[in-house]
């Protein structure tokens, strides 16, 4: 339940739930002998717990959902800022990637300066002319489309029919491999 609370805290941008869930996860990292996670997560939880006294302005922003990013505007779709940063990097890189970029100081500076502007331009273009990643221009995920739902329903019916014909493979106790 703790892990689900952590995920919910991010999706709903609930900073108080985020702190509670992290505090509940700390003992699990100790129990699983993840030394670095248990050590540094303990420090991070302490920092987040004392944030209201140490940095009240930052705390106020975090309470107002500033510790996550919601690109789509849909409920329950906020993500961690580091994940949002990775999305922006992927958007700017495109299919070609940024191989060798860090080895050329001039190219790296250009990336650092132009990256956010390129991301903004791409987002404005997609908003105006649509997307090519399967999402509709209105923010609807491709899995919400009628054709996808119909195809999914047919796949489920096919799977159920196979179970009915051959039996449930999860209940089968034989050692034979079924093709």
Image (spheres, rainbow, N blue to C red):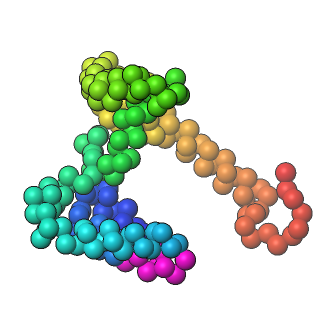
Q: Nearest the camera: 112 or 106?
A: 106
Image vertical order of residue 120 relative to residue 56, above or below:
above
Q: Quadrant of the N terminus?
A: bottom left
Would you identify the image quadrant in which residue 125 lies? top left
Would you identify the image quadrant in which residue 33 lies? bottom right
Residue 28 colored magenta? Answer: yes
Q: Nearest the camera: 153 or 93?
A: 93
Q: In this view of the protein, can residue 35 be seen by the observer?
A: yes
Residue 45 colored magenta? Answer: no
Would you identify the image quadrant in which residue 50 lies? bottom left
User: Looking at the picture, how far across and down is residue 77, in whole percent?
Assistant: 32, 49
Q: Residue at x 35, y 41 (%)?
A: 85
Q: Is residue 36 left or right of residue 128?
A: right
Q: Residue at x 23, y 64 (%)?
A: 15
Main SS of residues in magenta: helix
Q: Is residue 68 left or right of residue 149?
A: left
Outermost right residue: 176
User: Looking at the picture, how far across and down is residue 82, in whole percent?
Assistant: 36, 48
Q: Nearest the camera: 152 or 37?
A: 37
User: Looking at the picture, how far across and down is residue 128, in whole percent?
Assistant: 27, 20
* Magenta residues, start to end: 24-33
Q: Residue at x 18, y 58 (%)?
A: 62
Q: How many marks?
A: 0
Q: In this view of the protein, can residue 79 be seen by the observer?
A: no
User: Looking at the picture, how far across and down is residue 68, in whole percent?
Assistant: 27, 52
Q: Residue at x 32, y 68 (%)?
A: 44
């Amino acid at each position: 339940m703790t892990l689900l609370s952590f995920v919910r805290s991010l999706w709903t941008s609930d900073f108080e739930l985020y702190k509670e869930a992290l505090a509940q996860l700390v003992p699990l990292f100790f129990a699983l002998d993840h030394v670095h996670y248990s050590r540094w997560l303990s420090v991070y939880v302490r920092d987040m717990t004392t944030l209201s006294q140490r940095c009240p302005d930052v705390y106020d922003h975090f309470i107002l959902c500033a510790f996550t990013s919601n690109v789509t505007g849909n409920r329950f779709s906020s993500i961690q800022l580091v994940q949002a940063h990775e999305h922006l990097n992927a958007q700017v890189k495109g299919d070609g990637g940024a191989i060798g970029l860090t080895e050329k100081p001039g190219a790296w500076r250009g990336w650092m300066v132009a990256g956010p502007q390129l991301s903004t331009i791409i987002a404005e273009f997609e908003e105006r002319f649509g997307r090519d990643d399967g999402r509709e221009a209105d923010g609807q995920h491709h899995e919400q489309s009628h054709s996808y739902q119909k195809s999914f329903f047919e796949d489920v019916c096919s799977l159920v029919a196979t179970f009915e014909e051959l039996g449930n493979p999860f209940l089968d106790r034989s050692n034979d491999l079924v093709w």
